Image (cartoon, rainbow, N blue to C red):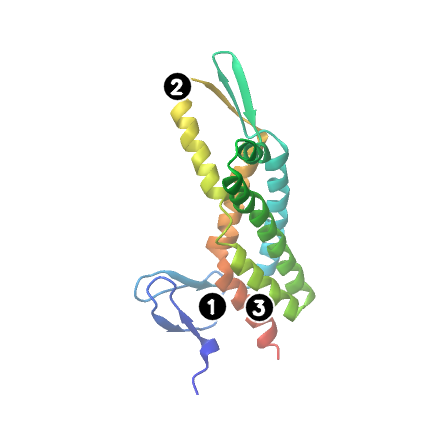
Amino acid sequence: MLDLKKLIICPRCGALHKKRRLDFGEVALCSVCEEKLMQSCKGVEYKVLAFSFAGIIFFLIANLFSIVSIDIGGLDASMRLYEAIYRLFEEGYVLIAFFSFLVLELYPALLMVALMMYGFAMILGKKEGARSILRVVASLEEWSMVDIFFVSILVAMVKVYEYASIEFGIAFWSMAIFVAIEIYLVRFIGTQTLWEAWQRRFDEAG
C-alpha cells in the first residue's frame, strides 16, 4: 500500500514527488517547475525560536514608536501604526480599520507567538502541542500583511519626497527587520519544512 506520508505535492504545478531525507543545507526542488519543495530541517526548531523571539521584539518596537515623520511647509506630522488604524476608525471606515487591525496587528503578532511556541514545543518534545501549533501557523501565515503595508509606505514616501522633508523613525527600521524575519520564517523555511522537522522528531522516533 502506498504510504502518502512519503510523498509531497508541488504547491505550484501539482507534480507528485517522493520524499527523501535531506542532508544539512540541501534543498529539494520540483523536477517540473523547480519550485522549492522542502529543505534540510536539522535544528530548524532553534532557528524558528530565535528568529520568532526577535520578530516579537521588533514588532513591539514598530508599534511603540513613530514610523515616519513628514515636514511639509513647516507643518510636521508623524505616524504610528496603531494611530493610522485608529484614524481610519475615526473617519468612519470601520470595516477597513477592523481588517487592517487583523492583518497588520493581530495576525502578525499571533503568527510570531505561534512560531515561538512551536520552537519551544519541539525542543521540549511536546508532540501534540507542536502539531496543533503548526496548524495555527498554517492558518495565520497567509493573513499577515505587514510586508504589503511596508511596501505601500515606501511607495507613498517616493511620491511625496520632492515636496516634503521625510525622516524615518526607529519603528520604520524595526518594521523592515520584522518583515525580513517573517519572510525568512514563512517563505524561506516554510511550514512544509516545519512539518518535516516535526515528522522526523516524533514519527521516526517511534
* CB within 8 Å, label 1 to label 2: no
Say if residue 7 shows up in the picture: yes
Above or below residue 106? Residue 35 is below
Query: At x 36% / y 60%, what residue is drawn?
Result: 35
- Indicate which label's residue lies in the foreground, 2 or 3: 2
Above or below residue 62? Residue 200 is below
Disc 1: CA contacts within 10 A as few (<14), some (14-19) or many (>=20)? some
The residue furthest top is: 74
Please state which amino acid type lies under the numbered disc 1: Leu
Q: Find the distance from the CA under tag 2 to the CA under tag 3.
A: 52 Å
Residue 198: give its label.
Answer: 3
Q: Which residue is mark 1?
A: 22
Query: At x 59% / y 51%, what residue is drawn?
Result: 112
Disc 3: CA contacts within 10 A as few (<14), some (14-19) or many (>=20)? many
Disc 2: CA contacts within 10 A as few (<14), some (14-19) or many (>=20)? few
Q: Position of residue 102 (x, y in %)?
A: 55, 46
The quarter holding residue 7 reads bottom left
- SS for dot 2: loop
Of 102 and 168, nearer the camera is: 102
Of pointers 2 and 3, the one earlier in the residue sequence: 2
Say if residue 40 shows up in the picture: no
